[in-house]
Image (tube, rainbow, N blue to C red):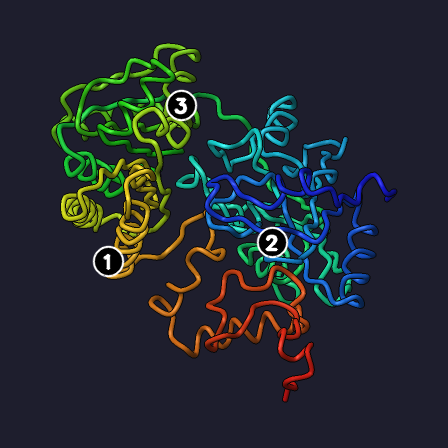
Amino acid sequence: MGTGHVLTEADVMASYGIDWTGRFKGTPAAVIRPADCAEVAAVVSHCKDAGFAIVPQGGNTGLVGGGVPLEGEIVLSLRRLSWVADEDFQGGQITAGAGTTIGVIQSAAGASGWDYGVDLGSRGSATIGGTIATNAGGLQVLRHGSTRAQLLGVEAVLGTGVTISHLGGLIKDNTGYDLGGLLCGSEGTLGVVTEIVLRIVRVPESTETVLAAFSTMGDAGEAVSRIIAEGITPAAIEMMDRLAIQACEEIVHAGYPDCGAALIVELDGPSVESGEFLRQVIDICSASGATETRVAASEAERALIWKARKAAFASMGRISPSYYVQDGVIPRTRLRDVLESISALSARYGLRVANVFHAGDGNLHPLVLYDNAEPGAGERALELAGLILESCITAGGSITGEHGVGSDKACYMPKMFSPGSIAVMGRVRDAFDPGDLCNPGKALPTPRLCGEVPGMYRPHAIETAGLAERL
């Protein structure tokens, strides 16, 4: 591996000790950058013997602290595992290293007429390893499914130092336990994924993109429900409210209408099918109260519509000094109810909330806007964001759709799962990583006891001084 890939300089390590939000920070004992699975296994084994916990880290685009080290842990950066296998894609699959960005995978597949279905706003920096960690869905999840649905094979190093390889790349394989499925969504707590085989699909013959404007989010939500009820499965249905539109327009200037809510519906497939569905979607939007519907007339116009949507998170800085990104899921049928609840909470706390989300699968991304210079505003924003999650749970939903639990939402897990369910998850984690080596303190509600420190055992100061002993 070479000493050049073991980093200990404080200023260099600082960039590995923080995620995209800037809210979660930690100081690693070192940053190690392995180049392949064998080096990952060697590092994991060494850390296990030396008593260091490790934090697998990809592109550092996380939003819940999942890839941020606790004090004194080793960051295992997987950015050097960035490659796409040079092979024939005709089997409908692609193999990549865990540090490869989604954009690189999509470009490699697209050059041969294929498409990787998980499309993210952060595609240029988010790695496939990171999206496996959180089971990300992205913009086209309605048609293609989340990352887990694309996963055909996986290679990983467990917390025991053992390497597992299930890289057959078979379209169907019902043999044994689904270890890849367990690793997907485990947020690096079961082991370190190093190599992945992914499902890809042919680039569709035709793609139609509709931008529909509505007076209210409720009307837009009604259109979403009617589209799905009609049996139409678009590649994507995205929604933005007025605040989100205003922020995006300041950066992208995509020409979005001034409205209470905008709906982006994208249809792909054979030309005859997508053309027929396009007519039905326009009729449904109009019947649901759309004040305007616009069909992208060219690839350039389509790209501009999506550029604005993908810029939503980053553009919030134009309308607010600070903001908190939330991520929850609700049944589509409860969309209007939960949006009204968010609006009421926004008024109650005196904080604006910009809504931008994957409406097709009910994955909400409310953005709580606040000014950190205002005393107590940050705390109010966090409290409001937490109540939004509770609204999602009450509606029969989930506390995360793709950003993960990390350290940010672990305390909400008992609100969603029974003690028995959490205990079973803990036993699965113990089976993969009995020493709690991999990303301790994340995903599951720890510490379990007051004063318990997550991760590998660290002696307390009074124990070191000989004033107490561990029982």
Q: Secondary structure at mark 3?
A: helix
Q: Which residue is mark 1?
A: 395
Q: Position of residue 351 (x, y in %)?
A: 22, 41
Q: Earlier in the sequence, mark 3 or mark 1?
A: 3
The quarter in which the N terminus is drawn is top right
Q: Amino acid at mark 1?
A: Ala
299 sits left or right of 241 in the view: right
Q: Position of residue 315 (x, y in %)?
A: 38, 26
In three-dimensional space, the C-alpha distance between marks 2 and 3, rounded to whole angstroms, equals 34 Å
Along the viewing direction, whichever of 443 and 102 lies nearer the viewer: 443
Label 1: how many Cα within 10 Å (few below 14, some 14–19, many 20+): some
Q: Position of residue 66 (x, y in %)?
A: 53, 52
Q: How many marks?
A: 3
**Figure check: 255 above or below 417:** above
Front of the two marks 2 and 3: 2
Q: Which residue is mark 2?
A: 69
201 sits left or right of 275 in the view: right
Along the viewing direction, whichever of 283 and 292 lies nearer the viewer: 292
Q: Which residue is mark 3?
A: 306
Residue that protrudes farthest toward the right in the picture: 2
In three-dimensional space, the C-alpha distance between marks 3 and 1, rounded to whole angstroms, equals 29 Å
Residue that protrudes farthest toward the bottom in the picture: 471
Q: Amino acid at mark 3?
A: Trp
